[in-house]
Amino acid sequence: MFELKKKGDQYHFNLKASNGQVILSSEMYNSKAAAKNGIESIKKNCGDDARYEKKEAKNGKFHFNLKSTNGQIIGSSQMYAGESGMNNGIESVKKNAPTAEVKEVE
C-alpha cells in the first residue's frame, strides 16, 4: 500500500510491502495532488526495468531510484546490505505498486 502523509505543509508517501516494510519513499511534494500524481507515475513506470537506477553507496551498501519517463526520480529505496537484497526490493516494487491502494495517514 502507499501511505500518503502530510509533513508541515508538504506531502510525501511510502510504498509498503504486505509485511509493513517500506520499499520505496518519495520526495516531498508541495500539494496532495502532486503527491498523488507521483504515486500514479510509480504505478505507470514500475514495470519497466529501464526506469530503475541501481547504485552502490560509498559504504558498500546498495540502493535504487525509480525514475519517470523524463528522468526525474519519483521514488528511492532504503539501503540494502547486498546487491541481491536491492534486486529483491525492485521486484517487490514491480509486484506491489501497480495494484497498491493509497491510504492517507496522519
Image (cartoon, rainbow, N blue to C red):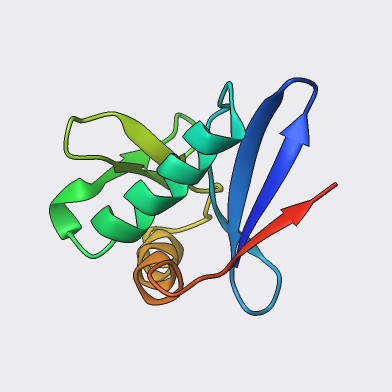
The N terminus, quarter of image = bottom right
Which sits in the foreground, 13 or 104? 104
Which sits in the foreground, 4 or 65? 4
Can you give x and y, in whole percent of width and height, for residue 89 in the image? Answer: 44, 64
Point 38% across, 70% down: residue? 98
- Residue ranking furthest to the front: 33
Considering only vertical position in the picture, is 38 above or below 99?
above
Point 34% across, 69% down: residue? 94
Can you give x and y, in whole percent of width and height, for residue 63 in the image? Answer: 43, 46
Residue 86 picture quarter = bottom left
Which sits in the foreground, 54 or 6? 6
Relative side of 105 to 75, left or right:
right
Residue 43 in sight: yes
Relative side of 83 to 32, left or right:
left
Point 62% across, 37% down: residue? 12
Considering only vertical position in the picture, is 3 above or below 13?
below
Relative side of 6 to 87, left or right:
right
Tag count: 0
Relative side of 41 to 68, left or right:
right
Residue 61 in sight: no
Point 43% across, 71% down: residue? 92
Can you give x and y, in whole percent of width and height, for residue 15 in the image? Answer: 56, 58
Residue 2 picture quarter = bottom right
- Residue ranking furthest to the right: 106
Can you give x and y, in whole percent of width and height, for residue 26 in the image? Answer: 53, 39
